[in-house]
Image (cartoon, rainbow, N blue to C red):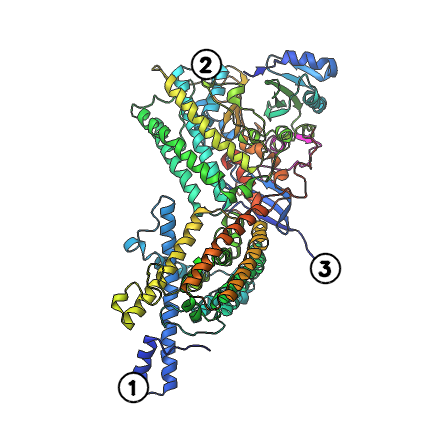
Amino acid sequence: MTLRTEPVVVSIGPHHPSTHGVFRMRLTFDGENIIDAEPVIGYLHRGTEKLAEERQYTQVITLTDRLDYVSSMTSNQAFVLSCEKLIGLEVPDRGMYLRVIASELQRIVSHLIGVGFFLQELGGFGGTALMYAFRERERILDLFEMLCGARITVSYSRIGGVFADAPADFWPALRRVLDDMPGYTDELEALVFESEIVQSRTKGVSPIDPVLAVNASLTGPVLRASGVAWDWRKAAPYDVYDRVDFDVPVGANGDNYDRFWVRIQEVRQSLRIVEQCIEQIEPGPVRATDAMLFRPPPGDSYVPTESPKGELGFYLVSDGSIAPYRCHVRAPSFINLSLFKEMLVGWKLADAIVSLGSLDFNMGEVDR
Amino acid sequence: MGGGLEGNAIYRAVYGLVVDTLGWASWLAYFIAAMVIILIVVNGVLVLGTLYTWFERRVLGRFQGRLGPNRTGPFGLLQPIADALKLMFKEDIVPRGADRLVFSLAPIVMLVPTLLVLAIIPFGRGSFLADLNIGVLYIAAVGGITTVAVLMAGYASANKFATFGSMRAVAMVVSYEIPLVMALLGVTVLAASMSMVAVVEAQHLPYLLVAPLGAGVFLVAISAELNRNPFDVLEAESELVAGYLTEYSGMKYGVFMLAEFTNTIVAGAIFAVLFLQGWQWTVLSPLGSQVGFLGFLDTGVVRQIESHFWFLFKVGLFAFAATWVRATLPRLRIDQILSLAWKVLFPLSLLNVLVLAVEVIVWPEPSVGDLAIMAAINWPVAGAAFFVAARLVSLGTRAPGLGVGAAVGVR
Amino acid sequence: MTTAVTGHELADALRERFGEAVVDSTDGAVWIAPAAIAGVCAFLREDEAHDYALLSSLTAVDYVEYFEVVYRLTSLSRNAMTVLKVRVPGRDGPSLPTVTPVWRGAELQEREVWDLMGVSFDGHPNLKRLLTWEGFEGHPLRRDYLEPPLPYTWPHGG
């Protein structure tokens, strides 16, 4: 007797516990195996690029907060760097150091959330790993609150520097966090990478070939996990990244395991960078100009930066007015979805969820 | 039928009250007294199951560095009641396209086997509803029914997630029933009886110590049967939303959850009876099984109450361990779960039965000393077996047939 | 530090091979004729002297008289970056060849450009709406786009 079988199409999302917001994937199953996959996005499209065309440059900074909302410091930084390039503005040292400190702390936050949700998607732990990751995240968000009064939508970087100098009690608080973070990182790493089940679930799953990864414009930890040592902080150092010493961790197999291993290692490197910044930073002005109106000459500019998700850059076209003529966001989360189908087809539903988590995308940035 | 209710103090009190004071017929007295006992047992266990929801959330909270429910009543103890009230007042939605009858029947089918198992659990010294001479077999038989409920729920929901969940459940239970029954067989061989009471009385040493292999296999298999971590693939929230429970709401959902938590308590009771000496307490007592912790108050009533306490304590230990596992382990994938059952647990359970059978031939009616010798043999055997199994069987991932990246031409 | 390959340098290198297809160049970019863009991109990726393996970004700007599609290429081996631009004239149905066969990463970005700007890419494997929904009218990032009056709303929405 032969049983008649047929493929099942399951729409996972836009409301699903593990699709990082309102992402939808249209999966075709043969039993538990995926035979076709298609990403469906746009549920969180807010027209950021269109909105930016109607606002002054300084007002667009607040829009960038809402792109990658778990990593707004780096979005702010990428945008203001592009603005500064339009007019060739020099930023005072202290401002650049504060930006780098804030961005690296933000990178730690973003990677913690990435790893936390990765473990949540592996299932089980009853949420333990996620709670651990969030515990450390809270402390860093408290630091942001001291810097600029906000925790998520910070708008800390401004054209020509940062919003304000750090208060006096910021530095001891930062010191305490820096002293505790290596221990926390070890703890999380032990929880994740020494667990037999985590290894059997993630090693060798959804590997991405390095050539294919580059061809598909993947950037950030996803690219580095495939063995391509490409980091814009090294390749084209912006702010003060050329004055600090750090390594670019690179994975070997490009599988789910490596994608998270790379993120944990980057947390350590970020801590190194912050330590060096604290040593090097000197008193001085934090902002080049207090001009309220920013009116660049006609032209265009693009500064690639390394956000926690990958290459983030703002392509600004100026027509000489106070608002950008065109503001295109090169969103790493969005472009990292390019290999969605290749990563998922042939694996099981449980793997698909984890692979999706390993891309660590953020719907605010995917849909813009 | 083996023993009856005659040894039970409550039964005797009610029976005596009805026959002597009211002067009613003895069959009616038997009926009333039995119903009173059943009422106490069923409600007691359901309350325990409800309390376990609170317990799990509190303990899980502690594991995760937070508080857990602490606002309703002292220590949040009234939280289960608040939850139940909320569920009762929720709208009871049956999805369009659902098989209404099966959909409504599934929660009941889920809860009933849980309660049926209670019939043969000895809760304390001389405190049980029935002493079936096929008690161990009865557990295996009744326990399998819950799968039917899951399948019913998954099928009737007309939801793809629910179907996925219930299909996984069937695949899993078909695999895990076998090691589970094999582990039970080991206990039966040791005790030379299938009666639960006889099993408890035969445990001069806890069978957890005597047959570690069987206990280990049983623990893994029962977690799979209970759909608890790391085997909770059928309601894996990160993959299947809520699996077979996706379409359930209101009190039907409540009954499912109640059944699930009560199942854990009942599984703890089964484990306590089969592997932890049930109501006895001898591990700390050098004088053997006949003297309890409160041995100096060696009167019948005190010892009976004390035995209930020990039993509950062991169930609590199991519940705590279950929560601990939940907070520590991630979930396995369905194919890994199945290979664990067939490649690891099944051979180990066979080995367990084989070794125990040989030992029982050597020591036909084992005393404490004989059991200790058995334990001394079985622990190294178990360790070696686990080591070999870990070496031979890999749960790691192999690349699937469809090539990753094959779909696009890359230079 | 990443070398920014100026448009003039790149234009000189490309003129040998593509001749008239290289329309114009400035310090910042090279302008390529629409029909030749796929060939130029394939050459820049394959040729070892260029080796632009990574398509950093692909976007479009609406200059009302024409659309300008911007290709930002990165060479990982040479740590160099350059910009190609293509002027696509016309308001209804401007089109140019796709570069998806050259760079897999162009697929989603070209879909986005089609969705928001209305520049279509010939030969694209799956040119559908991306951020807006199927059946959406118009291309919202165009300068002359006007939001249609209510009751035009999300399907099945309020």
Alpha-carbon span between mark 1 and mark 2: 102 Å
Is residue C113 located in the magenta-colored stretch of the structure?
yes
Q: Dividing the image into 4 quarters, which one contains the N terminus of chain A?
A: bottom right
Dot 3: element: loop
Is C35 situated above or below C27? below
Image location (x, y in percent) of residue C63: 59, 22
Q: Is residue B304 left or right of residue A277?
A: left
- Looking at the rendered structure, whether the residues under marks 1 and 2 are on a common chain is answered as no
- Looking at the rendered structure, whether the residues under marks 2 and 3 are on a common chain is answered as yes
Alpha-carbon span between mark 1 and mark 3: 68 Å
Per the rendering, the mark at residue B20 is 1
The region drawn magenta spans C109-135
Mark 1–mark 3 CB contact (< 8 Å): no
Q: Does any portion of residue B4 appear in the rendered image?
A: yes
Q: Residues within 10 Å of mark 1 (few under 14, many from 20)?
A: few
Residue type at mark 3: give it.
Thr
Q: Which residue is mark 3?
A: A2
Foreground residue, A138 or A191?
Answer: A191
Q: Residues within 10 Å of mark 3 (few under 14, many from 20)?
A: few
Residue type at mark 2: give it.
Leu
Image location (x, y in percent) of residue C144: 57, 28
Foreground residue, C105 or B60?
Answer: B60
Alpha-carbon span between mark 2 and mark 3: 73 Å
